[in-house]
């Protein structure tokens, strides 16, 4: 299995687009969060991610087949594009509507690719850490601090002084407490 | 070939970071991935890979996996790495099993 860079995902998306045209499937929408979005904005430079997380309803079985086919052709995970994040409580029905979605730079025939803006990425990771069970995922914590650093918030003082981060203390107290405890990153 | 069996000659920290992400996804969702976990041959893995699996299991309190999966039992004796494994130049500033096992995560 090859490690997937932004270029690899670009190839996979264009291949998926080709297949959607060939099979005369209607257009699909991808609302990208997570690792792919972080790589897209250079938050995870020179890095890899396993998949594209799309905050959309499940794709139909035909699209899932095509995704699997592209994965096999390009030696990527069978679910290199998936909607697993939509199953998390409050993500699809609430968070998706709060996020600003940017049109991607790519031009596809049957794919509408939108990428969450940086604050949207931040919101998703804050929520993940806040709601994340007994032990929030370490990967979500790492992504959270990476995004905060990217927007020049390097400690709890800078966070408190940043209007765009105010929502963390008011809406996600558990995440705010975690950031307060670690202090700086 | 699964990434956790690959030779790690010439690997960068980004490569280890990715390996950790793959293993994390596998073990965090162990119920969904039980078949793949059951087939893992720990003896074919590098010490670094074994330590990463051990860290993930211990971080989430999934110690029961070391009993439930016969093939994971050898991981009970996992020791900290002699040389620090850096996954990230800016590790999380928290005290946790990764730090204890000499992994900068």
Image (cartoon, coloured by chain):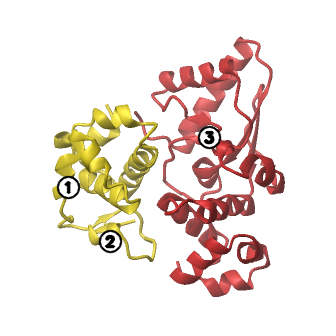
Chain colours: A red, B yellow
Q: Which residue is mark 2?
A: B99
> Would residue B96 appear left or right of B71 to someone viewing this image?
right
Residue under the point 27% across and 41% down: B69
B31 and A99: which one is in front?
B31
The answer to whether any part of residue B66 appears in the image is yes
Q: Which residue is mark 1?
A: B76
Q: Are marks 3 and 1 in contact (CB under 8 Å)?
A: no
Q: Secondary structure at mark 1?
A: helix
Q: Percent from the top left, x then y, of residue B60?
A: 41, 59
| Whole-number angstrom distance, CA of label 3 to CA of label 1 | 32 Å
Q: Which residue is mark 3?
A: A84
Neighbours of disc 1 within 10 Å: few (<14), some (14-19), many (20+) = few
The quarter of the picture where residue A164 lies is bottom right
Residue under the point 20% across and 64% down: B81
Q: Are marks 3 and 2 in contact (CB under 8 Å)?
A: no
Chain label for disc 3 = A
Q: Indicate which label's residue lies in the foreground, 3 or 1.
A: 1
Q: Percent from the top left, x then y, of residue A46?
A: 49, 54
Instruction: Confirm whether circles 3 and 1 share one chain.
Output: no
Quarter of the image that includes the N terminus of chain A: top left
């Amino acid at each position: 299995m090859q490690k997937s860079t932004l270029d690899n995902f670009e190839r996979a998306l264009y291949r998926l687009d080709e297949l959607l045209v060939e099979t005369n499937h209607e257009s699909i929408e991808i609302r990208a969060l997570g690792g792919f979005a972080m790589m897209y904005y250079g938050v995870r430079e020179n890095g890899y991610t396993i998949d594209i997380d799309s905050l959309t309803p499940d794709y139909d079985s035909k699209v899932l087949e095509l995704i699997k086919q592209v994965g096999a052709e390009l030696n990527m995970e069978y679910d290199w594009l998936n909607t697993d994040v939509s199953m998390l409580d409050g993500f699809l029905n609430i968070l998706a509507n709060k996020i600003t979605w940017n049109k991607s730079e790519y031009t596809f025939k049957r794919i509408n690719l939108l990428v969450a803006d940086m604050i949207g990425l931040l919101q998703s990771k804050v929520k993940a850490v806040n709601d994340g069970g007994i032990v929030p995922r370490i990967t979500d914590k790492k992504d959270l601090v990476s995004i905060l650093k990217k927007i020049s918030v390097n400690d709890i003082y800078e966070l408190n002084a940043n209007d765009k981060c105010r929502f963390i203390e008011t809406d996600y107290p558990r995440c705010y407490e975690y950031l307060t405890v670690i202090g700086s990153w | 070939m699964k990434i956790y069996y690959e030779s790690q000659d010439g690997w960068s920290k980004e490569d280890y970071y990715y390996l950790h992400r793959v293993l994390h996804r596998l073990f965090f969702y162990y119920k969904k991935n039980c078949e793949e976990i059951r087939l893992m041959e720990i003896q074919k893995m590098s010490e670094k890979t074994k330590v990463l699996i051990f860290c993930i299991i211990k971080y989430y309190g999934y110690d029961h996996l070391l009993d439930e999966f016969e093939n994971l039992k050898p991981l009970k004796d996992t020791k900290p790495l002699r040389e620090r494994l850096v996954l990230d130049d800016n590790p999380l500033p928290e005290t946790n099993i990764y730090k204890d096992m000499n992994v900068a995560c």
